């Protein structure tokens, strides 16, 4: 086992353990904080696999913004300290869907790569230049489509949160 | 001159820790004295005899001696962990900020700018943890204000940084300084203003200190903290000043470039500029009243964001034209 293998396994284990705590913890806010650990160690995995840009995007978007927004929303409504006994978690469907999706993806990945070994030096590092070239050449159409989707979501959010906009014109 | 790898790493780590511990103290002491003189006072005069230079060391000793109180209703683990989480992002940020030309940076990175922006955004998790785990209405309100403020101001901060990265054509902090030319001071002036103001808001310095607002929220999300943990939060605030000043220097003020002797005295230019920007941070604190929460959001969305977007257009136009 190389250092890379050990690091990927260790970070993966941390990520998995934290993710399990997210869905099993009875403390509402602590579950959100475990999500920070899970997503952060996933960023560590990306970093070890030389996908540097992806790793920092993960930290910037998921840890710095998405989880923070979730915690913000939870704290605005109801965030008791200590365990909550009335958490309505769909246990059996959750295990089925989560486990099924995880196993399915794992099967697809294992089938795709088998036990083929790819040296880290053979992979083009995912730095900003490489990422930019890819996004603006081969993937330019999905990229633009995604930006249109985000724009639509943005406008939708404004419309939903401002009922007075429509009423004034009526 | 070559030295063994382990020695080089040890020296670099020691350098980062020295910067991490010394620079915030210098900024803090300067704040004591500068603010006092701006308000017609003398500030600390006794500790260490000469103009109270040892005041912050004395403060540190005092903080260590104080009782470390954890509220009975608090979520103890989260409460105790929060000050450490508040410090880590700035420590990571200091690692990639270049002090001088060549190898005078703890860890040069191809994507230093991106890394810094990403980790500085993580600091907000610590604020939410502190405010929520204290089990106190004032702290929770302070944390929510901080979260709303930081999420909003991250946008102009990133846009302004993107403008200068676009101008330099690189995300490496050293590369940006290499590409910097004096006329960029004019070209990137709006971005400089946006970045500095958004940076002030990111570290919650006055006039953007609504999350702490001592006249409304006792002491915001820090209300329940005492002793060493409170001191760690204070340290995080002053390291934050150093990081924002250093980033402003590196991105917009040419880093180690000066009128003469760039190659030999580069680190001195960087430190001088960081000091000057930190001075402005203190000056702004003394001069402006605190913004209300609604004014804060208004200023960000209707002031900084449009300016930053316009600057992006300008940068792109000049870049295409030349």
Image: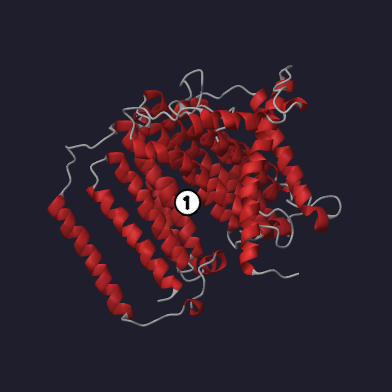
How was this image coloured? secondary structure
Image x and y of residue A104, in percent: 23, 69
Among all residues in the image, which is located at the extreme left?
A: A92
Residue B106 in sight: no
Among all residues in the image, which is located at the extreme front?
A: B65
Q: A82 or A160: which is nearer to us?
A: A82
- Quadrant where the C terminus of chain B is found in the figure: bottom right
Q: B30 or A57: which is nearer to us?
A: B30
Q: Residue at x 49, y 80 (%)?
A: A122
Q: Residue at x 55, y 51 (%)?
A: B92
Instruction: Name the image quarter holding residue B136.
Output: top left
Q: In the displayed structure, does residue B132 sit left or right of residue B88?
A: left
- Quadrant where the N terminus of chain B is found in the figure: bottom right
Q: Residue at x 36, y 83 (%)?
A: A116
Q: Residue at x 55, y 25 (%)?
A: B291
Q: In the displayed structure, does residue B1 sit left or right of residue A70?
A: right
So how many labels did they put on this image? 1
Image x and y of residue A98, in percent: 22, 58
Please, is residue A148 above or below residue A78 in the view? below
Please, is residue B55 above or below residue A150 in the view? above
Residue B222 in sight: yes
Q: B101 or B312: which is nearer to us?
A: B101
Q: Residues within 10 Å of mark 1 (few under 14, many from 20)?
A: many
Image x and y of residue B207, in percent: 59, 27
Please, is residue A45 above or below residue A151 in the view? below
Give the residue number, with chain letter if any, for mark 1: A60
Q: In the displayed structure, does residue A4 sit left or right of residue A156?
A: right
């Amino acid at each position: 086992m190389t250092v890379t293998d050990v690091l990927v396994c260790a970070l993966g284990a941390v990520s998995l353990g934290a993710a399990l705590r997210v869905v099993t913890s009875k403390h509402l806010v602590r579950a959100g904080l475990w999500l920070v650990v899970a997503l952060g160690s996933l960023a560590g995995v990306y970093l070890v696999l030389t996908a540097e840009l992806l790793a920092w995007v993960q930290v910037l978007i998921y840890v710095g913004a998405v989880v923070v927004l979730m915690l913000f929303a939870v704290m605005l409504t109801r965030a008791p300290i200590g365990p909550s006994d009335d958490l309505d978690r769909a246990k059996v469907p959750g295990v089925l869907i989560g486990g099924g999706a995880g196993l399915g993806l794992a099967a697809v990945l294992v089938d795709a790569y088998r036990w083929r070994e790819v040296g880290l030096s053979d992979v083009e590092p995912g730095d900003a230049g490489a990422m930019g070239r890819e996004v603006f050449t081969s993937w330019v159409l999905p990229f633009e489509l995604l930006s249109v989707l985000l724009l639509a979501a943005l406008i939708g959010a404004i419309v939903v949160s401002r009922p007075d906009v429509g009423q004034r014109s009526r | 001159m070559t030295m063994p790898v382990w020695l080089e790493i040890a020296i670099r780590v020691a350098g980062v820790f020295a910067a991490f511990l010394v620079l915030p103290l210098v900024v803090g002491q300067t704040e004591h004295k500068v603010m006092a003189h701006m308000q017609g006072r003398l500030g600390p005069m006794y500790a260490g005899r000469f103009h109270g230079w040892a005041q912050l060391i004395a403060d540190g000793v005092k903080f260590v001696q104080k009782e470390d109180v954890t509220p009975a209703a608090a979520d103890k683990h989260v409460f105790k962990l929060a000050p450490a989480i508040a410090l880590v992002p700035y420590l990571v940020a200091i690692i990639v900020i270049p002090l001088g030309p060549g190898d005078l940076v703890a860890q040069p990175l191809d994507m230093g700018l991106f890394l810094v922006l990403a980790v500085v955004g993580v600091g907000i998790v610590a604020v939410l943890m502190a405010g929520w785990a204290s089990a106190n209405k004032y702290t929770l309100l302070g944390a929510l204000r901080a979260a709303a403020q930081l999420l909003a101001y991250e946008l102009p901060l990133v846009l302004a940084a993107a403008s200068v990265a676009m101008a330099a054509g690189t995300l490496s902090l050293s590369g940006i300084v290499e590409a910097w030319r004096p006329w960029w001071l004019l070209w990137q002036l709006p971005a400089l203003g946006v970045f500095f103001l958004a940076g002030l808001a990111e570290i919650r310095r006055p006039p953007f200190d609504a999350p702490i607002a001592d006249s409304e929220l006792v002491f915001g999300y820090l209300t329940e903290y005492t002793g060493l943990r409170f001191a760690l939060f204070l340290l995080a605030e002053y390291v934050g000043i150093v990081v924002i000043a250093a980033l402003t220097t590196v991105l917009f003020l040419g880093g180690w470039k000066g009128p003469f002797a760039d190659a030999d005295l580069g680190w001195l230019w960087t430190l001088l500029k960081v000091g000057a920007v930190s001075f402005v941070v203190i000056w702004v604190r003394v001069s402006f009243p605190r913004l209300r929460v609604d004014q804060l959001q208004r200023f960000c969305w209707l002031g900084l964001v449009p300016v930053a977007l316009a600057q992006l257009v300008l940068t792109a136009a000049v870049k295409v034209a030349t």
